[in-house]
Image (tube, rainbow, N blue to C red):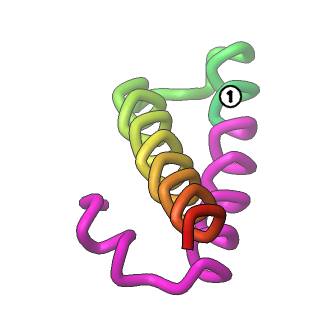
Amino acid sequence: MKAEEIRNMTTDQILAKFNDAKEELMKLRFQQATGELTDTSRLRFLRRDIARLATVLTERHTQEGEG
């Protein structure tokens, strides 16, 4: 997911995606710990998506405070 796609979403949609991604990351970590995870690169991409979502949320929160 690209940052521009995230910026075009509403704040509620971003929060929902953020929560879903965090939950999926937790599940993948459990799979990795038990040896069930085959696609370990998914962890990396998911962490980056979470960071992008958090960045856009922070930007919006900062803009609301200024505006």
Q: Amino acid at mark 1?
A: Gln
Q: Which residue is mark 1?
A: 31
Q: Residue at x 68, y 72 (%)?
A: 16
63, 6: nearer the viewer: 63
Q: x%, y% of residue 35?
A: 63, 16
Is 17 covered by the magenta stretch?
A: yes
Is 6 covered by the magenta stretch?
A: yes
How many labels, in total?
Answer: 1
Q: x%, y% of residue 45?
A: 36, 38
Q: Residue at x 52, y 65 (%)?
A: 63
User: How busy is the neighbourhood of tag 1: few (under 14 within 10 Å), some, or many (20 plus)?
Assistant: some
Q: x%, y% of residue 14?
A: 57, 71
Q: Residue at x 48, y 56 (%)?
A: 59
Q: Residue at x 62, y 20 (%)?
A: 32
Q: Pick the quarter of the image with the N terminus.
A: bottom left
Predominant secondary structure, magenta span: helix
Residue lying farthest front?
66
Classify residue 4 as left or right of residue 61.
left
61, 7: nearer the viewer: 61
Displayed quadrant of residue 48 = top left
Task: Say above or below: 6 vs 49.
Answer: below
Q: Pick the quarter of the image with the C terminus.
A: bottom right
33, 16: nearer the viewer: 16
Displayed quadrant of residue 30 = top right
> Could you tell me which secondary element the residue under label 1 belongs to?
helix
Task: Say above or below: 49 vs 33.
Answer: below
Classify residue 34 as left or right of residue 66.
right
Q: In the rendered structure, which segment of residues is drawn in magenta? A: 1-27
Q: x%, y% of residue 33?
A: 71, 14
